[in-house]
Image: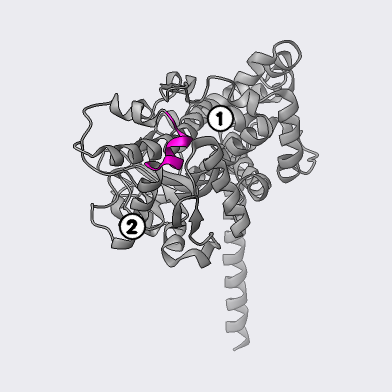
């Protein structure tokens, strides 16, 4: 028995020795890294674009610095103060860490022009994987730092009324809580996604549904619905679509109240004819052969709804990553979109004169004629990565929704409504034959 146990112990020792020797050979045969950082990247602080061209533009040419980053050097430093603490890395003894200034600059440049991450890697002298990690974490940090302050969902009736006051003062549309629209964001087909993101327009996309105020700032953002999703369910699937359907108590929106010569005028969103007519969502009267009072209503609604068209136009013109299919997984695309929306609101509210100078946004003359903004010459939806969604519903709607639209129609055609836009009848009549 003792001899058997001794043989077993010897066999176990032999097998263990073989395993140890095999693993040692594998470690020796395994290819070792030639270096921790590529030699060309080790010269980043001397030859990289952040340490050369960017610093030259900052000191000598502010106009080109703005074109490079979409903001002034002072605004960049302010943004860095907000985002920097979230993207600062601990010091490392083996190599120099990339500073938060450079991380933020890499991300802004990527969002501003939409160049491939490999191109960013060559320009900034970093590894492609490093650039990808920087973009992901900086976009996430941008949303975390800016969202609470610059994309504030109204939480009380008073805050909603401030938005409505903006539409009334700027666009003569009373009781308007925002302008709504949606876009397909064009993407390259994600891995193993099948046809989930393939839409009826024959490209892969995710859906972006937003609401903006009269200052062209986004107040609600819903990102990430599959491009293949039926457009009729896009609004009903969104969080704010479901909330508005439940009634004013969900968002604490103001209840209908008297306005000048109109009793119980509701507070509503406004959209184009792709959206369903609801008691809280106004859309134009459909068709071409319309009576004059209906055409006046359509004109007034269209005039106010241009805010969302301009907001999307500014977003596409300034942050050109949306102008072509984005090569990124859906999780990263979600972070990119959130960061861009935050940056748009941040610059509109803190550096508006530089971000959207005079003439950049649509305006109108004293007779109501539209003067197209410069953004239309820079980025257009038809040739870019932002594409309009299709019709969301049919023409059937409730009596309550019809009554709400008629209330706005009657006001716009009243003496008080015409006093807001004295040119409306002349404008409407000049657009075609008047129908009685």
> Residue visible at 64% across and 23% down?
354
Q: Is residue 385 above or below residue 233?
A: above
Residues in magenta?
Answer: 413-422
Name the residue that disc number 2 marks. 403
Position of residue 238 measured from the top left corner of the image (x, y, whole percent): 42, 56
The disc at residue 251 is none
Q: Is residue 101 left or right of residue 219?
A: right
Colour pattern = one colour
Q: Which tag is nearer the camera, tag 1 or tag 2?
A: 2
Residue 412 appears in view: yes
Q: Is residue 348 above or below residue 174?
A: above
Name the residue that disc number 1 marks. 110
**Who is closer to the viewer here, 260 or 336?**
260
> Residue visible at 53% across and 59% down?
253
Quarter assignment of residue 244:
bottom left
Position of residue 393 measured from the top left corner of the image (x, y, whole percent): 27, 52
> Residue visible at 44% across and 53% down?
262
Task: Please rate how many residues cluster around mark 1, counting C-alpha atoms within 10 Å: few if below 14, some from 14 to 19, many from 20.
Answer: many
Seen as rendered, the residue at the extreme front is 415
Q: Answer whether residue 417 is magenta in the image.
A: yes
**Who is closer to the viewer here, 302 or 357?**
302
Task: Please rate how many residues cluster around mark 2, counting C-alpha atoms within 10 Å: few if below 14, some from 14 to 19, many from 20.
Answer: some
Residue 182 appears in view: no
Judged by its main secondary structure, the magenta piece is helix
Q: Distance from label 1 to label 2 (Cα)?
A: 48 Å
Say which quadrant the N terminus sits in: bottom right
Position of residue 311 measured from the top left corner of the image (x, y, whole percent): 49, 35
Position of residue 434 measured from the top left corner of the image (x, y, whole percent): 23, 31
Q: Is residue 334 left or right of residue 435?
A: right
> Residue visible at 60% across and 65% down?
16
Q: Considering only order in the chain, which callout, 2 or 1, is on the residue closer to the N terminus?
A: 1
């Amino acid at each position: 028995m003792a001899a058997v146990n001794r043989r077993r112990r010897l066999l176990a020792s032999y097998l263990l020795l073989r395993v140890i020797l095999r693993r040692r050979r594998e470690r020796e045969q395994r290819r070792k890294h030639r270096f921790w950082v590529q030699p060309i990247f080790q010269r980043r602080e001397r030859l990289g674009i952040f340490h050369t061209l960017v610093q030259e533009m900052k000191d000598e040419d502010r106009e080109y610095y703005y074109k490079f980053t979409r903001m002034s050097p002072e605004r960049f430093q302010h943004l860095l103060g907000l985002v920097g603490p979230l993207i600062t890395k601990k010091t490392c003894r083996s190599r120099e860490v990339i500073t938060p200034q450079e991380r933020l600059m890499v991300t802004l440049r990527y969002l501003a022009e939409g160049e491939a991450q490999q191109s960013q890697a060559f320009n900034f002298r970093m590894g492609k994987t490093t650039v990808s990690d920087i973009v992901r974490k900086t976009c996430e940090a941008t949303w975390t730092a800016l969202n609470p302050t610059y994309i504030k969902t109204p939480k009380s009736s008073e805050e909603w009324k401030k938005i409505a006051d903006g539409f009334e003062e700027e666009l003569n549309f009373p009781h308007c809580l925002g302008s709504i629209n949606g876009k397909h964001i064009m993407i390259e087909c994600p891995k193993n996604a099948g046809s989930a993101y393939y839409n009826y327009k024959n490209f892969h996309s995710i859906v972006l549904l937003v609401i903006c105020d009269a200052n062209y700032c986004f107040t609600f953002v819903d990102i990430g619905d599959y491009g293949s999703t039926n457009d009729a369910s896009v609004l009903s699937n969104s969080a704010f679509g479901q909330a508005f359907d439940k009634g004013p108590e969900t968002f604490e929106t103001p209840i209908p109240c008297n306005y000048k010569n109109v009793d119980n005028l509701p507070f509503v969103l406004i959209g184009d004819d792709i959206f369903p007519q609801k008691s809280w969502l106004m859309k134009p009267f459909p068709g071409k052969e319309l009576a004059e009072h209906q055409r006046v209503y359509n004109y007034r609604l269209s005039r106010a709804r241009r805010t969302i068209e301009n907001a999307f136009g500014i977003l596409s013109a300034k942050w050109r990553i949306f102008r072509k299919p984005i090569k990124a997984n859906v999780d990263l695309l979600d972070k990119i979109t959130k960061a861009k929306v935050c940056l748009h609101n941040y610059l509109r509210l803190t550096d508006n004169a530089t971000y959207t100078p005079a003439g950049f946004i649509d305006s109108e003359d004293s007779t109501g004629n539209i003067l197209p903004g410069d953004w239309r010459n820079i980025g257009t939806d038809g040739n870019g990565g932002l594409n309009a969604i299709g019709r969301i519903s049919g023409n059937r709607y409730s009596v309550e929704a019809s009554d709400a639209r008629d209330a706005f129609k009657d006001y716009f055609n009243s003496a008080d409504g015409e006093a807001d836009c004295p040119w409306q009848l002349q404008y409407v009549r000049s657009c075609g034959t008047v129908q009685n």
